[in-house]
Image (tube, helix red, strand yellow):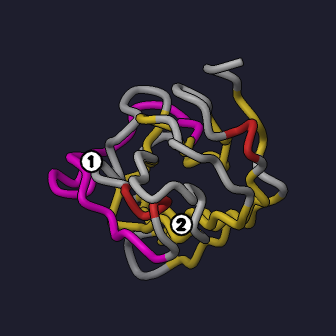
């Protein structure tokens, strides 16, 4: 069924205190099943705190759409904007990596409350294939 939410297998949240900012990283790896690649499905990756300013990140995947004409689009964002971190996530169509290109990163958006980070299926896979997905979000808090 499309539109389901799954938790990532596990994630780490690392923070480093500098002179005036705390720099953090949410780093999750998930073994994706074919049933998680339907339209509007979400994989819950982790959380960023209130006051987090998005710096960057990426999506890295195995080939999750084995069709000769793959269609899979994955985005990376939070509760408010599904593609705020990675907007053009065609990486699942073939194994590879896609760097953050979303409006949150471009505009250095700061959260007003704690936010949950998700990978969202924007376009379902033509022929879904199981594999590994890694999502990384970099941010700082002043």
Location of residue 42 in the rendering, given as x and y in whole percent from the top left corner: 61, 34
Location of residue 31 in the rendering, given as x and y in whole percent from the top left corner: 79, 60
Looking at the image, the residue that sits furthest to the left is 107
Counting labels gives 2
Vertically, is 95 above or below 108?
below
| Quadrant placement of the N terminus | top right
User: Which residue corresponds to the image point at 25% horizontal and 51% vertical from the top-left?
Assistant: 102
| In the displayed structure image, the side of residue 34 where residue 69 appears, left or right | left
| Quadrant placement of the C terminus | bottom left
Looking at the image, the residue that sits furthest to the right is 9
The kind of secondary structure element at disc 1 is helix
Q: Earlier in the sequence, mark 2 or mark 1?
A: 1
In magenta stretch: residue 112: yes
User: Which residue corresponds to the image point at 52% horizontal and 74% vertical from the top-left?
Assistant: 95
Q: Which residues are magenta?
A: 96-117
In the depicted view, which residue is nearer to us: 128 or 25?
128
User: Which residue corresponds to the image point at 46% horizontal and 77% vertical from the top-left?
Assistant: 96
Vertically, is 65 above or below 37?
below
Place residue 44 in its image quadrant: top right
In magenta stretch: residue 29: no
User: Which residue corresponds to the image point at 29% horizontal and 48% vertical from the top-left?
Assistant: 87
Q: Which disc is residue 116 wearing?
A: none
Vertically, is 84 above or below 29?
above
In this figure, which residue is indicated by the disc labeled 2? Answer: 136
Tag 2: Cα neighbours inside 10 Å, few (<14), some, or many (≥20)?
Answer: many
The kind of secondary structure element at disc 2 is strand
Q: Which disc is residue 104 wearing?
A: 1
Place residue 91 in its image quadrant: bottom left
């Amino acid at each position: 069924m499309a539109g389901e939410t799954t938790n990532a297998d596990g994630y780490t949240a690392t923070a480093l205190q500098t002179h005036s900012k705390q720099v953090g990283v949410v780093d999750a790896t998930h073994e994706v099943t074919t049933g998680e690649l339907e339209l509007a499905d979400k994989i819950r990756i982790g959380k960023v705190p209130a006051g987090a300013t998005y710096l960057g990140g990426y999506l890295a995947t195995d080939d999750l759409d084995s069709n000769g004409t793959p269609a899979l689009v994955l985005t990376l964002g939070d509760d408010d904007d599904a593609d705020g971190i990675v907007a053009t996530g065609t990486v699942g169509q073939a194994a590879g990596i896609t760097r953050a290109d979303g409006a949150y990163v471009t505009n250095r958006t700061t959260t007003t409350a704690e936010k949950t980070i998700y990978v969202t299926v924007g376009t379902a896979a033509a022929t879904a294939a199981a594999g590994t997905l890694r999502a990384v979000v970099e941010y700082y808090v002043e």
